[in-house]
Image: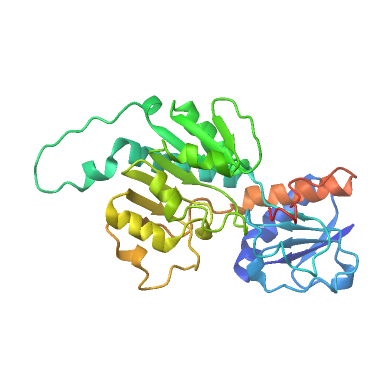
Amino acid sequence: MINVLFSATPEAWSAYAKPLRAAFAQEGIEVTLGTDLAPETVDWIIYAPNGGLHDFTPFTRLKGVQSLWAGVEQIVENPTLTVPLARMVDPGLTQGMVEWVVGHVLRYHLGMDADILRTDGEWVKHLPPLAQHRPVAMLGLGALGTACAQALSALNFDMHGWSRSARQIDGITCHHGDDRLDDILSTAQIVVTLLPSTPATENLLNGDRLSRLPRGAMLINPGRGPLIDDEALIAALDSGQIAHATLDVFRTEPLPRGHPFWTHPNVTVTPHIASETRPDSAARTAAQNIARAQRGQPLQHVVDRKLGY
């Protein structure tokens, strides 16, 4: 028998309680699961940063924390958390991200906005290049970035991936290191950002790097808001250096009223929906990971505190 504290919002508990109990039962793990367990009795915490728990000191027998979120920037530097922290790497979340990213890349590639928004009755055709002639850059080759890049590669896009450390992925030309980032940007007509938010990635796409893109390039950010310098992006949009940006994440969420992104004609704002965590599949992932550890196997997707992800 293990004791698992669920620390998230009441709404999340309503959505997760039943699938988590079913998932632990499927793993053959007897569990006491709840939102108000005595800290000194808790073995594992299933956690979201918006649940209000910030001090892990009272959890004296805690073995580990399984995050419900893919991003861990709000918890990774917490000095009271000294046990392993696992990111949420869930098939449902990954598939949702793949569908969202592929949809928006195809929207840009095919010029769907120009076709759909023409209302003056003028019959205008345009012929986009085939996918193999459209260079696409995926910045970030973690679980989500790799899955999206592979899906786009399967559609024959000229896929280039960039990460801070070296990767090898079939069908994708992989680059790594700061010096190679400028090279990948110099040819990319569509850029997708799926990097974590860390001090090393903040304002990665600044004015200088945006200027290195081919004029009229398009940007899609379902990763993290701080990856992009907001003021530099607005300037690049105003000048036509960037033709359009689709932004799903922001430095402050919800995006504040009055922010220039809301009304800029060349920005599409979406409300952090690129991939929501689905309770059924995320519950299975959390239970499976905790069950692995209980059986003496390594916990999966453990965060490297030095790297921040």
Instruction: Locate the N terminus and report the quarter of the image it occupies.
Output: bottom right
Q: How are the residues colored? A: rainbow
Looking at the picture, does residue 206 appear above or below residue 127?
Answer: below
Residue closest to the far left: 121
Tell me the residue at 54%/32% (across/down): 150
Q: Quadrant of residue 60?
A: bottom right
Residue 155 percent coordinates (x, y): 44, 28
Relative to 136, is 78 on the left or the right? right
Q: Which of 275 and 291 is in front in this view?
A: 275
Q: Quadrant of residue 74?
A: bottom right
Looking at the picture, does residue 42 appear above or below residue 98?
Answer: below
Tell me the residue at 32%/43% (across/down): 215
Tell me the residue at 34%/54% (across/down): 236
Looking at the picture, does residue 125 appear above or below residue 33?
Answer: above
Residue 154 percent coordinates (x, y): 49, 27
Residue 176 percent coordinates (x, y): 60, 38
Residue 107 percent coordinates (x, y): 34, 41
- Total tally of numbered discs in the picture: 0
Visible residue check, residue 98 = no
Visible residue check, residue 87 = yes
Q: Which of 113 and 171 is in front in this view?
A: 171
